[in-house]
Image (cartoon, rainbow, N blue to C red):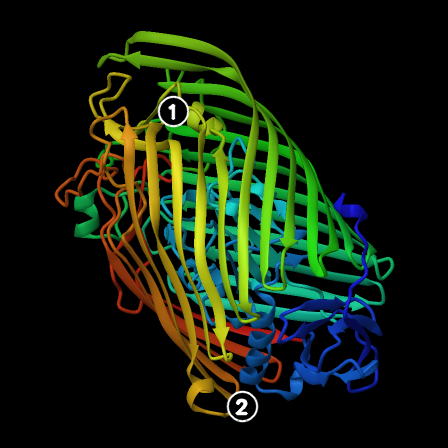
Amino acid sequence: MFLLIGYAVLGQSKISVSFIDASGKTISGVDIFNTETREHFTANASPFEFSVPENRAYEISFYKEGFAIADMTIGPSDKTVEVNLQPIETLSEVLVQKNREKAFALSQLKDIDETAIYAGKKTQAISLDKIVANKSVNNTRQVYSQIAGLTINESSYGGLQLSIGGRGLDPNRTSNFNTRQNGYDISADVLGYPESYYTPPTEGLKEIQLVRGAASLQYGTQFGGLVNFKMNEPSLKKIELTQRNTAASYGLFTNFTSLSGTDGKFSYYTFFNYKQGDGFRPNWNFSSRNIFVNLNYQFTQKTSLHFDYTLFDYLEKQPGGLTDAMFYEDPKQSNRSRNWFQVNWNLLALRLKHKFTDKADFSLQVFGLDASRDALGFRSNRVSDPDDETYGRDLIKGTFKNWGAEARFLQKYNLKENSSALLVGMKYYQAENTSIQGPGSSGSRPDFNFAGAEFPNYRFSSDYSYPNLNLAFFAENIFKLSPKFSITPGIRIEKIRTKSDGSYREVNVDLAGNVIYDVTEHENLVKDRNIFLAGIGFSYKWKPTLETYANISQNYRSVTFSDMRLVAPGLAIDPNITDEKGFSADFGVRGNHNDKISFDASAFALYYDDKIGEYPTHNPNNAALDVRYRSNIGTALTYGVELLGDWKIDKTFFDIPDFSWNYFVNVALTDSKYLKSDDVLVEGNKVEFVPLVNLKTGMGAGYKNFTAALQLTYLSEQFTDARNLPSDKNDNTLGIYGQIPSYYVADLSLSYKWKRFRLEAGINNFTNNSYFTRRATGYPGPGILPSDPRTFYGTLEIRL
């Protein structure tokens, strides 16, 4: 019905605008912002037509990456306008940043972005150009400093993996978010194993988009929502070379080299990223390489084709975990010398974008993954046990082969003279994954071959395949009931079929090495379900710079195959574990006051039914030590308030174009409770991974080509299991139980640009605090994983 509604825009005046540079050459791809109505257009051609209301003149801003922002007053009588854009080479670094901040501030609250709807949702975006931070190692607490309420696992030196959570979601490998790159999935298996072993390098990113739980309707069922990494766009030059080399503490060296350009209708962006380092603990070193290729062809003003290829692989020697006593004695020690981890990731994606009309957009993504992950190590849950080279090691080999296609169509239309929009889409996804667990070799080399002949009676072994199928339909509609008020309902219908086909073997021996128990069990499990999710969002824009928003959406998380069948000495799994379901809700106010103070203050709630969690219990395999038991713990509620504010001190007190000074605060106050549980020791407890206070604050300043940033991070204590066991600093056996104590950490980053050169330097954790953010139960070795001590870094960038 809505597709048949007329397109005429009443009370609008058409403006034709053309763009040229200093040499008179025509420019396309310019962003046009009406600073008063907050409307946004992208001029894919020059000249380009857009509309302004007929009643008066408006302030219009024009922005193109690589050029200074241009501001003009345009009214209905200005039928033809020419805009001359100035190259940024003539500007200081601070002025360039101010231009980017202005454009970013104007565009971040867009309700519609190509074939996506964000109206009424809790959305945040990180513009990487604005950040002064240690980008070479993806320093998460700096890069995500202005995303409210995130909890972070900081135990991956070199930034090889991203582990973020929040609102009671386990941060491990970002497994509670739908993780995408340029709009397509990059995790191992969206439903069966949604863990992210690949993280795009920050140096290659333009923006990181995060949409909270309401993203479940458009992007999938995860409770956390969406994390989308938007890669850098091609340079306007025919060829542009950027090289960044970083040296840092503990033998860290990284190289990032990108090549990009535009020649007529063809454009490209590619990079190569290499990292190597030793880590700050013994038995720790790694090397990685990341290749990315983006090719684009603009057939016409309305049709374009985009191809992406990503290769990421690395080999890491891992120092394992520590007991509490070991951590407080010396957090830099290690008693594991044989733990290794390797990853190989290959991603392919093809995107077609087409505009049927100015109000009808279509996109089609076809994507695929061919990847593997191998983990090898001595994983005794008695962390204090010596690592004897004559012992066999656990080896888990996983392969992930999946592909999918997602089509989206967005139609804008008028409803009582107000611009509304309908989005419909479908997604097909299938995967064929395998997981094999068994004995690894003795010795200490990174030998990723099974050693069944050397250890024929190894305690645990398994061999499974996981063919998964997912078909989804989704729809959302912005009903603009007045110029200020809109309602956005949506639905998602999912068909999910997961299979588990294989066998596992368990062997017990006596002290003399005689086999007393040897059982092999075969399984062929099929879980077929149809899921219906619904949600609704509300937005009231008191004025273009002040908005009240609210939303509530159902969420669902499929039980993963690692939840169903993965044997670890420190972990046992409930054989009857099942899917999680619930809903998330947000209510907030966000806005900008005179371009001096921007803010987003909101309250939220996450309700989980059949929440999957862990607690210590007697080992069901009758071993001597207790284990962490993973099961559907019960019904849980997480709730709180999140406040993000940024104050531009320079605009408040000074009027100096080449000077900038801002202060930001990002605080989340979060509480939680298990409302009911079959375990009497769980009901009424706090939910895991929920610090009461999560604070990030700091300031940035710049003068001409010099910029600096100072940041303080503080998190109060948080539990790691559903029974809320306290920590025991004297425990010198396990290290897998107890709280994560409160901690704070401070970072300083500096940057100076001179012509085509940029020098960056900084100190992370300059107070040299000892702290940790994770207690591991499996790889990279059970126990406490200490976070980085004080580290120094320096980066030299050359752009040609």
Q: Is residue 172 left or right of residue 397?
A: left
Q: What x and y, as percent, mark residue 186? A: 59, 44
Q: What x and y, as percent, mark residue 381? A: 27, 31
Name above or below for residue 549 compared with residue 491.
below
Helix, strand or loop at disc 2?
loop
Q: Is residue 324 left or right of residue 709?
A: left
Q: How many marks?
A: 2
Residue type at numbered disc 1: Val
Q: Residue at x 23, y 38 (%)?
A: 685
Viewer-closest of 201 and 36: 36
Helix, strand or loop at disc 1?
loop
In what quadrant of the picture does the N terminus appear? top right
Residue type at numbered disc 2: Pro
Q: Residues within 10 Å of mark 1 (few under 14, many from 20)?
A: many
Q: Residues within 10 Å of mark 2 (few under 14, many from 20)?
A: some
Q: What x and y, as percent, mark residue 405? A: 71, 38
Name above or below for residue 471 compared with residue 69.
above
Viewer-closest of 771 and 17: 17
Q: What x and y, as percent, mark residue 368? A: 67, 39
Viewer-closest of 499 and 364: 364
Q: Of the residues under marks 1 and 2, which one precedes in the sequence?
A: 1
Q: Which residue is mark 2?
A: 657
Q: Residue at x 25, y 58 (%)?
A: 743
Which numbered disc, 1 or 2, marks the residue closer to the eye? 2
> Seen from this angle, which residue lies furthest front?
416
Q: Which residue is mark 1?
A: 567
Name above or below for residue 482 compared with residue 63.
above
Viewer-closest of 16 and 702: 16
Q: Residue at x 27, y 24 (%)?
A: 678
Which image quarter: residue 406?
Answer: top right
Q: Residue at x 50, y 28 (%)?
A: 449
